[in-house]
Image (cartoon, helix red, strand yellow):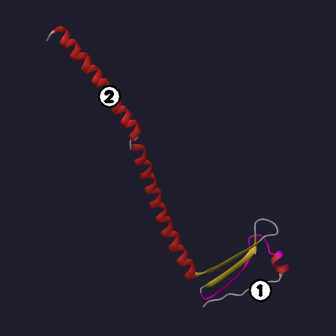
Amino acid sequence: MSEVRLEIPTDSLLKLPEGSSFHAKSGQARLDIGKGKEPGTIVVYASCDSLQRQCEYYEKSSSVWRECYEGMADLYEAELKQRSNPVKTFFTGLGIGIAITVLGMIIIKNKLKNGN
């Protein structure tokens, strides 16, 4: 187990010049402490090589899953746009059927009147 301990007096940290920081490392563990960009803020960065590798692995795998999800969401949206509305299809077919029936009846009446 790697462990880093860094004790810094508060006045030393507050007098730290812009862009510089205190560093400590022990085995796989690393610690950086410095002043933040905004006045009165302190930035502490701690890492461990094995944890960092594991975080990178999960970050990569989550980005792959995110890309797959976005791809599937795009396919789903495209499929929804491509599908026809069943109610619209029903009423379109009903209207065409009525129009064909009326035209057929007119043609049959005309043929019967003319005696053909």
- What SS does tag 1 mark? loop
Indicate which label's residue lies in the foreground, 1 or 2. Answer: 2
The CA span between labels 1 and 2 is: 85 Å
- What SS does tag 2 mark? helix
Above or below, comparing residue 116 to residue 15 in the picture: above
In depth, the one of 14 and 85 nearer the eye is 85
22 falls in the magenta region:
yes
Quarter of the image where the N terminus is located: bottom right
Residue extending farthest left: 116
Residue 96 marker: 2
Name the side, left or right, on which 35 lies relative to 94: right
Q: Which residues are magenta?
A: 14-27
Label 1 crowd (10 A; few <14 / some 14-19 / many >=20): few
76 falls in the magenta region:
no
Name the side, left or right, on which 15 lies relative to 59: right
Residue extending farthest right: 11
Residue 79 location in percent, x, y? 40, 48
Above or below, comparing residue 33 to residue 96 in the picture: below
Residue 59 location in percent, x, y? 53, 70
The answer to the question of whether label 1 and label 2 lie on touching residues, with beta carbons closer than 8 A, is no
Task: Give the mark nearest the N terminus, 1 or 2.
Answer: 1
Amino acid type, mark 2: Ile
Residue 91 location, quadrant: top left
Amino acid type, mark 1: Glu
Give the residue displayed 28% in from the left and 24% down from the top.
101
Give the residue displayed 32% in from the left and 26% down from the top.
98
Give the residue displayed 74% in from the left and 70% down from the top.
19
Q: Which residue is mark 1?
A: 7
